[in-house]
Image (cartoon, helix red, strand yellow):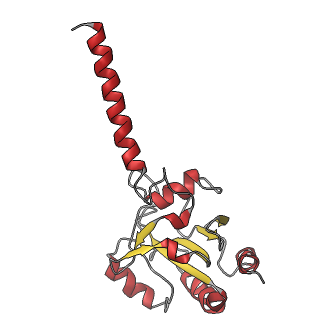
Amino acid sequence: MSATFLILSATLMAVAIAHVHAADDAKPGTPGTAKGPLDFTLKANDGTPYDLAKLRGKVVLLVNTASKCGLTPQYAELQALHTTYQERGLVIVAVPANDFGAQEPGTDAEIRTFCATYQVGFPLMSKVSVKGDDIHPLFRWLTVDGPKPGPIAWNFTKFLIGRDGSVIGRFEPKTAPASTDVTSAVDLALGK
């Protein structure tokens, strides 16, 4: 084979690969096109699509959850926040994940039944991965491209999203939902 043929073949292959990646990036909800966390769609616990864009204008507390974690009692505090602030525009979104100590091993139906014990009245999503090779694109964006980057360390990491769809706060797992750090930030975001 001639050197010209090899260069031409390599160039054509590079163009084809770039075209495939550009097409992937053009799909809604992928990190390449997302400008914020509300540009993604999750799957609700019942399997239906849950377009986060419908939450624009609300304040959102997005939490990766687990049913068999030492922090699982935070569900009660999350429900209390929901009850206190929902009329002012707070939406809590629970996103179960089984990435830490296999502490969310159940099916979506089992997770829904478990959450009923905490009388969860806020949106509950289907289980996703929040780290690793199979990380959900939303969590890849939050931990890599977002303004509060860094890997999620454990269950019950909380991201506070303002009415404009921007990430305005991040609270690590042991920061309780009822803590003044969280409630003050929620009050401020809601415009108290």
Name the quadrant of the C terminus: bottom right
In the picture shown, does residue 29 fall above or below 44? above
Q: Position of residue 128 (x, y in %)?
A: 40, 65
In the picture shown, does residue 1 fall above or below 92? above
Q: Position of residue 121 (x, y in %)?
A: 50, 90
Q: Quadrant of residue 77?
A: bottom right
Q: Position of residue 134 (x, y in %)?
A: 38, 54
Query: Can you name the residue that lies furthest to the top here?
Result: 2
Q: Quadrant of residue 106?
A: bottom left
In the picture shown, does residue 49 fall above or below 78? above
Residue at image x 45%, y 80%? 124
Name the quadrant of the N terminus: top left
Left or right of residue 5: residue 111? right
In the picture shown, does residue 135 fall above or below 104? above
In front of the other: 142 or 118: 142
How many numbered discs, if any?
Answer: 0
Left or right of residue 192: residue 142? left
The answer to whether one can see residue 5 in this image is yes
